[in-house]
Image (cartoon, rainbow, N blue to C red):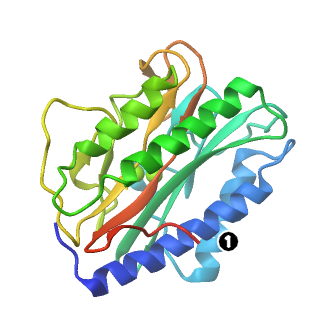
Amino acid sequence: MKRTADEIAKMRRAGRVVAEMHAETRAAANPGVTTLDLDTVARAVLDRRGARSNFLHYRGFPAVICTSPNDMIVHGIPGDYVLQEGDILSIDCGAIVEGYHGDAAFTMAIGEVSASAQRLIEVTERSLWAGIEQLRSGTRLHEVGRAVQDVAEKAGFTVVREYVGHAIGTAMHEEPQVPNYWPGTGGPMLKAGMVFAVEPMVNAGGPETRVLDDGWSVVTADGRLSAHFEHSIAVTEDGPEVLTLP
Ligand code: MG
Ligand code: MG
């Protein structure tokens, strides 16, 4: 769906709130802090900016951020987990401003992490930017996944198949989906005004996933690390505009 300049302006404002939630949770995510503490930090940003959460109550989700440490890929529920030196942590969150949504995620190191963990984080972020580069009028949507997969697999990692990116606008998850791999067809032709959340989930080991008994937390089937980066991006006449940057 194509959005007007006015709609994209609202999504840019929502995106700025998400970027602020990222900055403040990142600063607070130190050894000894619980993931629930980080949810409190993010809620304060939403309150201060007069924005609403698109995560809270989504299919019953109890928090405004997802916190997914180590082998957890996505959808972790903030709770009493205490961050430890050497962990990696993925934080995913969103905001609604005047009915328009932003959605973005990042993975960070808690203190000093292994070189291999650091490399996974860097490659996953690089795969996101390779995908974003494809969001140009006249390109087909599935080139995003091809670019993401190429970066991740050349580094010796794998991309998750079961969870994907999405269009975003007046709902967080709109059609079409944005796979992080080449699905075999080019997909829809991109046009200025379309807005997508691109969100590669990259695993150090195999791509297989498993959902924990809480019904939310998605972990790697082999127990190895996973990283997740996401931005919301508008296709413009001048190329991709990332809406969830500060
Ligand atoms: Mg997200
Ligand atoms: Mg998303």
Residues 163 and 119: in front is 119
Report the front residue among 11 and 38: 11
Q: Which residue occupies 38% across, 54% down? A: 132
In the image, 4: left or right of 45?
left
Q: Judge whether 3 appears above or below 94 on screen.
A: below
> Residue 180 at what x, y percent from top left?
34, 37
Quarter of the image with the C terminus in it: bottom right
Figure quadrant of residue 192:
bottom left
- The type of residue carrying mark 1 is Ala
Q: Residue at x 66, y 56 (%)?
A: 39
Residue situated furthest top in the rendering? 222
Residue 197 lies, in percent from the top left, at 37, 55
User: What residue do we see at 56% from left, 36% from top?
Assistant: 123
Residue 109: x, y in percent? 74, 40
Evaluate whether residue 192 shows in this view: yes
Q: Residues within 10 Å of mark 1 (few under 14, many from 20)?
A: few
**Image quarter hosting the N terminus:** bottom left
Q: How many marks?
A: 1
- Quick one: SS at disc 1? helix
Q: Quick check: 132 above or below 43?
A: above
Q: Is residue 174 above or below residue 115?
A: below
Left or right: where 70 falls relative to 137: right
Viewer-nearest residue: 4 or 93: 4
For label 1, the residue is 44
In the image: residue 203, left or right of residue 58 = right
Residue 147 on image: x %, y %: 35, 39
